[in-house]
Amino acid sequence: MRFLLMTLLTLLFLKLFRMARPTAVWSAIILVALVFGALHLPATAELVELSSLIIVRAMLLNGIAGIAFGLLYWKRGLESAIVAHILTDVIVHGLMPLIL
């Protein structure tokens, strides 16, 4: 998502729409975060029945994570975004069920 889509959208915004670099990067981060959130909806649907509230919640939580991962990719590189995503998955899907 970050390496291909975010980079491609950033270049598209820079070249085609002639946006300033920060605006282009932020626009790409937000759009990719929305796609990231939407791609997590099938997994959410396996856990609970989808309702408007559940969809908004899933999109919001995954969108926030997507923005954080996008910022990490922009500022620190792909590896840091990957490590953050893995650690988030370990905490949310691995450790949280043990605690709750």
Image: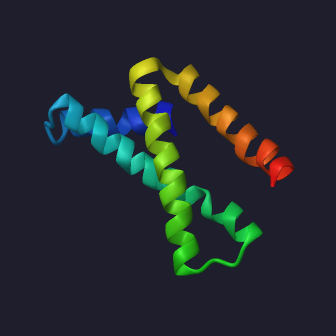
Frontmost residue, 82 versus 97: 97
Q: Residue at x 75, y 38 (%)?
A: 90
Q: How far across and down, in percent of the image, does residue 85 sit?
A: 62, 35
**Left or right for 4, reference 30:** right
Q: Residue at x 49, y 30 (%)?
A: 3
Q: How far across and down, in percent of the image, does residue 25 sit?
A: 29, 35
Q: Residue at x 58, y 57 (%)?
A: 39
State the quadrant of the C terminus: bottom right
**Left or right for 56, reference 71:** right
Q: How far across and down, in percent of the image, does residue 32 sit?
A: 43, 46
Frontmost residue, 68 versus 70: 68
* Quadrant in which residue 21 is drawn: top left
**Left or right for 58, reference 23:** right
Q: Residue at x 60, y 30 (%)?
A: 84
Image vertical order of residue 83 relative to residue 17, above or below = above
* Quadrant in which residue 49 is drawn: bottom right
**Left or right for 19, reference 61:** left
Q: How many marks?
A: 0
Colour treatment of the image: rainbow
Frontmost residue, 34 versus 60: 60
Image vertical order of residue 52 relative to residue 29, above or below = below
Q: Residue furthest front?
A: 99
